[in-house]
Image: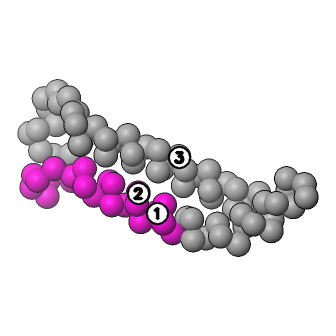
Amino acid sequence: MSDMEFVRTVVVPILPYIQIILSVLLVAAILLQQRGSSLGGAFGGDNFSAAFHKRRGGELFLFRLSIVLAILFVLSAILNVVA
């Protein structure tokens, strides 16, 4: 079995489910990063954005997790188009 045949027979049928799971996890990771500020904070209008803020602990984990999930989602979308 060649590589492309493996991709077409095994990966392509489960790819939509993988994309759904990645998208739900990505949305959850992004929403969990939102700070408890006012509605203006969602549009960049809060006073907190003027000061430097160092991510630590869980916030850093969520930030890195959202980057990894976004990269995986984009790669799965590209694979869906190519295969």
Where residue 14 sits in the image (x, y, percent)? 65, 70
Where residue 13 sits in the image (x, y, percent)? 70, 72
Q: Which mark is residue 23?
A: 1
User: In the rendered image, which residue does mark 3 sit on?
Assistant: 71
Q: Is residue 66 visible?
A: yes
Q: Is residue 43 visible?
A: no
Q: Regarding mark 2 in the picture, which secondary structure is present there? A: helix
Does label 1 or label 3 sit earlier along the sequence? 1
Relative to 66, say whether 53 is above or below.
Answer: above
**Chain part drawn in magenta:** 20-42
Q: Are marks 1 and 2 in contact (CB under 8 Å)?
A: yes
Answer with left or right where residue 28 lies relative to residue 35.
right
Identify which residue is drawn at 13% across, 29% down.
51
Identify which residue is drawn at 62% across, 58% down.
77
Mark 2, other Cα within 10 Å: few <14 / some 14–19 / many ≥20: many
Relative to 59, say whether 31 is above or below.
Answer: below
How far, Cα to Cα, is label 3 from label 2?
10 Å
Q: Quadrant of the C terminus?
A: bottom right
Q: Nearer the viewer, residue 69 or 77?
A: 69
Answer with left or right where residue 43 lies relative to residue 68.
left
Does label 3 or label 2 sit earlier along the sequence? 2
Where residue 79 sits in the image (x, y, percent)? 70, 56
How far, Cα to Cα, is label 1 from label 3?
11 Å
Q: Amino acid at mark 3?
A: Ile
